[in-house]
Amino acid sequence: MDLSATTMIKAPVESVYAFVSDPSNDVRWRTGVTESGLITDPPLGRDSEGFVKVGSQIGRWKVTAIDPDVSVDWDLIEGPYAGSGGYRLEDVDGSTRFTLVADVEPLGFMRLLGPLFARMGRRQNQGDVETLRSLLEV
């Protein structure tokens, strides 16, 4: 299910990319994230692996493609969800159109929540990109 969210950030693409390409910053803008980071050595690149902890749940991801200042793609490789995600950044007159891409399916008992999970996930991700916007706008 597509849980993607987009916002406009009044900051240059390079600044936004620098912030979001450091997974340890997820705790500052992603709802419920208490810890996040790289498992492999920095910097973020193709085949980098990282983790995110939300409550007692830990998810792991692996970068499948990266184009600095333009996009990052990853696959979820362990945790409560299956799927993929990433970031898309586009320069728009000195500002950044930022999209958090999320195409995920809940696993286990969470699958039973289906449409409710999708609605809540979209709302949460939109809130997250708006938090990112408020942190990064100049």
Image (tube, rainbow, N blue to C red):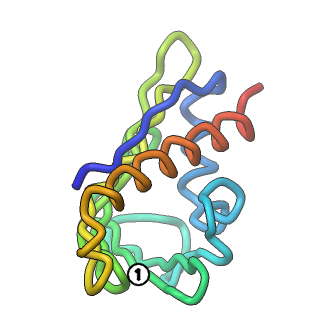
In the foreground, 116 or 25: 116
Q: Position of residue 79 (x, y in %)?
A: 37, 85
Residue underneath mark 1: 60
Please name whichever residue, 57 or 92, is drawn nearer the observer in this view of the structure.
57
Asked whether, in this view, residue 65 is left or right of residue 95, the answer is left
Front residue of 118/24: it is: 118
Residue 77 is situated, as x and y percent measured from the top left of the image, at 29, 81
- Disc 1 crowd rating (10 Å Cα; few below 14, some 14-19, many 20+) is many
Specify the quadrant that holds the N terminus: bottom left
Instruction: Say what amino acid the circle numbered 1 marks.
Output: Arg
Q: Is residue 42 above or below residue 55?
A: above
Q: In this view, does 62 lie to the left or right of 1?
A: right
| Location of residue 17 with respect to 121 vertically, above or below | above
Residue 65 position, x and y percent, is 28, 58
Which residue is rendered at x = 65% and y = 22% of the image? 10
119 w.r.t. 80: above or below: above
The secondary element bearing badge 1 is classed as strand
* Residue at 44% over, 34% down: 6
- In this rendering, the count of numbered labels is 1
Is residue 122 found left or right of 113 in the rendered image?
right
Which quarter of the rendering shows the C terminus? top right
* Residue at image point 26% right, 49% down: 2
Q: Which residue is drawn at 32% across and 77% down?
A: 110
Q: Nearer the viewer, residue 130 or 106?
A: 106
In this view, the residue farthest toward the top is: 93
Q: Which corner quadrant of the image does residue 53 belong to?
A: bottom right
